[in-house]
Image (cartoon, grey):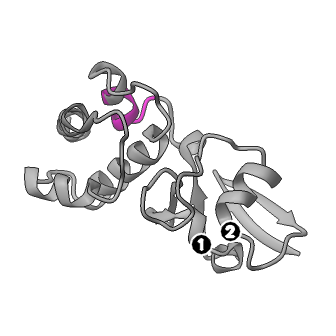
Amino acid sequence: MISITVNGKRYNLDVPPEKPLLWVIREDLGLTGTKYGCGMAQCGACTVHVNGKAVRSCVTPVSSVAGKDFSVVTIEGLPEDHPVKKAWIEERVPQCGYCQPGQVMQAAALLMANPRPSEARIIKAMEGNLCRCGTYPSIKKAIRRAAKNTLK
């Protein structure tokens, strides 16, 4: 049995310790907002927070986040009124939407660590999150808006 906390709720799961966190989240917990993209931590679609830091769940064994010292947050666990989620809507960022949960989670982690990121820092933080629709200008604009709203 592996015990993990996801979105503030504790789960005891009978899963192999090497099972990727992504598949535990999607298959065992039924939280399908976190997406599978590449399976190699190269695209960012599977980004979740572990103790407030952005992590690629497709290559993270569930055993590495087990126990009371770890808290996992998925896109479903980020409040609807979170400045990043609100900015994403206000800036009309999503097109196909597939990469957006990972983009939002990466941006939220950036703003938790650095509430006033420079343009260069935004680009650097987001460069590992791919968007096939090319919404990068809108993503940057939404992050800047969320940063302003976070500071109020």
Labels 1 and 2 touching (C-beta < 8 A): yes
Q: Earlier in the sequence, mark 1 or mark 2?
A: 2
- Residue that label 1 marks: 60
Q: Position of residue 52 (x, y in %)?
A: 45, 62
Q: What is the number of the mark on residue 20? A: 2
Q: Which residues are magenta?
A: 81-87
Q: Answer left or right for 62 relative to 133.
A: right
Say above or below: 20 vs 112. Answer: below
Say above or below: 128 vs 76. Answer: below
Identify residue type, mark 1. Answer: Thr
Q: Position of residue 109 (x, y in %)?
A: 36, 56
**Helix, strand or loop at mark 1:** loop
**Helix, strand or loop at mark 2:** loop
Quarter of the view holding residue 113: bottom left
Please rate how many residues cluster around mark 1, counting C-alpha atoms within 10 Å: few if below 14, some from 14 to 19, many from 20: some
Residue at position x 78%, y 79% in the image? 17
Question: Does 84 lie within the magenta span?
Answer: yes
Between marks 1 and 2, how big is the CA–CA gap?
5 Å
Q: Nearer the viewer, residue 1 or 39?
A: 39
Question: Does 28 lie within the magenta span?
Answer: no
Q: Quadrant of the C terminus?
A: top left
Q: Position of residue 122 (x, y in %)?
A: 18, 52
